[in-house]
Amino acid sequence: MCPKCVVEIRDSIVRGKADIEALTENLGTIRAEIVEEADTVVLRKICERHGPFEDTLASDAQFFWRMENLFPGADLPRKQVQSYGIHSVKYGRGSYLIVDLTTRCNMKCDTCFMDANQIGHVYEATFEEIKAVLDNAANVEPKREFNVLFSGGEPTLSPHFLEAVAYAKSIGLDRIHVATNGITFAEDPRLAFDARAAGLHGVYLQCDGMSDDKNAHRRVGNYLDVKRLALEHICAAGMSVTLQVTVARGLNNDGVGEIVQFAAKNIDKVFGVVFQPVMFTGRDEQIADERRYELRYTLSELATDLQAQSKTDWKPMRDWFPMACYGIFSTYLDMLDPSRGRGSISASGHPDSQIFSALVVNRDTGDWVPVGSFFNVESFLNDVEAVVSNARGPVLSKAQVALAIIRNFDSTMAPAGLRVRDLFTLLEQCTLRSNCQVDDWSSAVYKRDQWRMLIIGASWFQDLFNYELHNLEMSTALVADPGLDKTGKGLGEVSFSFKNAGGWRQLSERLRQAPSLSQWHSTHGRHAIYANDQLVPIQGVPQKAAASEVHCDKEGIKVAN
Ligand code: SF4
């Protein structure tokens, strides 16, 4: 897509000068070429009206091609007709369904993919809208398990947060999460208990580094104190967190290793880490080219940085895989029990956008190593694929997988104390991540085994500079779309990248006549927003200003002096 044409088209639609189809059909589409150059992979495209655009897809071409070569292929085609034209997701069920509860937020980060607190209007889903999108989601085919991720803005500001969780649980969804900046969880310990009681399984906690300077762009003075207290409250309620890390080069990429170290040392509290290189949309949609080149961070760079910042031998070319490879556990489980009403979860996204690395953590010491340092992961995945292809029935298939575990294990390289039988426990942890149709799944996932699998994931969401329609077709991070009007016309599931970078958010919220900020404030009042390095007043932490001193000015930005 041409980054400038798309914005022009979107603005024309908002002004009533063009139809929705101007965006969903091929206006703004331009051909691009992907070329390898000096061991990097770049994308180049030329718009007849706006000139050339270039962006980096990978800083390490070998890593890039390895991910492409390991990709096992897309999931089954989706059956539902989507109304997003060329931006529609065509394959898979989506491993995440993001349900945006509100555009309001109690922070004002320098980078914000959805421009929270600056967009000039407020969209807040009604409970009826939330129920409608969840009901719709439960029937999407292919019928697979998926994670519900309540998001925003700050989703816990929605008055419907707890009842939304409870409703999702009531219609048989078990993988229920919330993505939060943690302030409300830090402020009120009861929130985590109430959410857990309603059915929440886990929390995606925003955290961009283990020191305040790595989070300076978040503009909260006591950012890490807030995170630590939120973490304690969430874990006290029986949940754990996945650290959700936005990474930009030169901003915080020199601290990614510390985050993994923290996760391993706190393995009873931290379930996983997801690194998300910054996407240039929302506040950054009009970013200058030079600044974009400076900040652009690729998945291959992440793998290289993590290797450099770790004491263990974490090899980019051995230990990283497309997230779609993890899907072999899903097909294996589905083969063992095809009678289940819903297939296992499958994150079969594009290999340029979704990758993972598996670490094994000693729960007692917090020491960790990549699984690949003592176990041939690539060979094992191939073995399991062969077992699935042969489909010789549950008993024989399980025996074959057991043999594959033993065959690919190098005990001489394993961490001290890790035995063959521990590998079967680790396999069980993998299958529990894929299949939640077991008794008391949520508690089973949090079982405190001596050796814990820590999955480090990385998701590279597209913006208009690196947008690729083929990549988008197999998106696994989907956003529940309540439709273009109050009747629910066009209700569906839209890819995260089209929603936030392609312009669907701006269009749908305008067409649904989201109230302006001033209208919202006049009917609902204002809420505290922490910005300009202000301190969140939480127990035991020094304060500069209390929340009551934080105000919204007429542009919606609140500042206390
Ligand atoms: S926490 Fe920051 S990035 Fe997230 S919605 Fe709020 S302002 Fe945006």
Image (cartoon, rainbow, N blue to C red):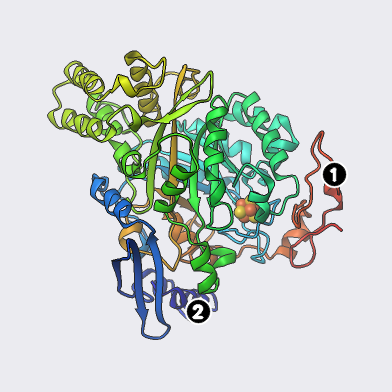
Q: Which mark is residue 131?
A: none
Instruction: Please provide percent x and percent y for residue 79.
Output: 28, 49
Which is nearer the eye, 166 or 378?
A: 378
| Quarter holding residue 340 | top left
Q: Which amino acid, by three-letter code, is at mark 1?
A: Gln
Observer able to see residue 268: yes
Q: In front of the other: label 2 or label 1?
A: 1
Report if the beta carbon of the residue with label 1 is closer than 8 angstroms to ligand 1.
Answer: no
Q: Which residue is mark 2?
A: 12
Mark 2 → mark 1, Cα distance in angstroms: 46 Å
> Seen from this angle, which residue lies furthest bottom?
49
Mark 2 packing: few (<14 Cα in 10 Å), some, or many (20+)?
Answer: some
Report if the beta carbon of the residue with label 2 is closer than 8 angstroms to ligand 1.
Answer: no
Residue at 64% across / 48% down in the picture? Answer: 154
| 526 relative position to 312: left or right | right
Q: Which amino acid, by three-letter code, is at mark 2?
A: Ser
Residue at 56% across / 40% down in the picture? Answer: 258
Which is nearer the eye, 493 or 383?
A: 383
Q: Secondary structure at mark 1?
A: loop
Q: Secondary structure at mark 2?
A: helix
Instruction: Please provide percent x and percent y for residue 438.
Output: 39, 21
Q: Which quarter of the figure is the C terminus placed in?
A: bottom right
Residue at 66% across / 46% down in the picture? Answer: 158
| Quarter holding residue 323 | top left
User: Between disc 2 and disc 1, whose residue precedes?
Assistant: 2
| Quarter holding residue 14 | bottom right
Residue at 71% across / 29% down in the picture? Answer: 190
Q: Which residue is mark 1?
A: 543
Instruction: Please provide percent x and percent y for residue 482.
Output: 50, 54
| 96 relative position to 215: left or right | left
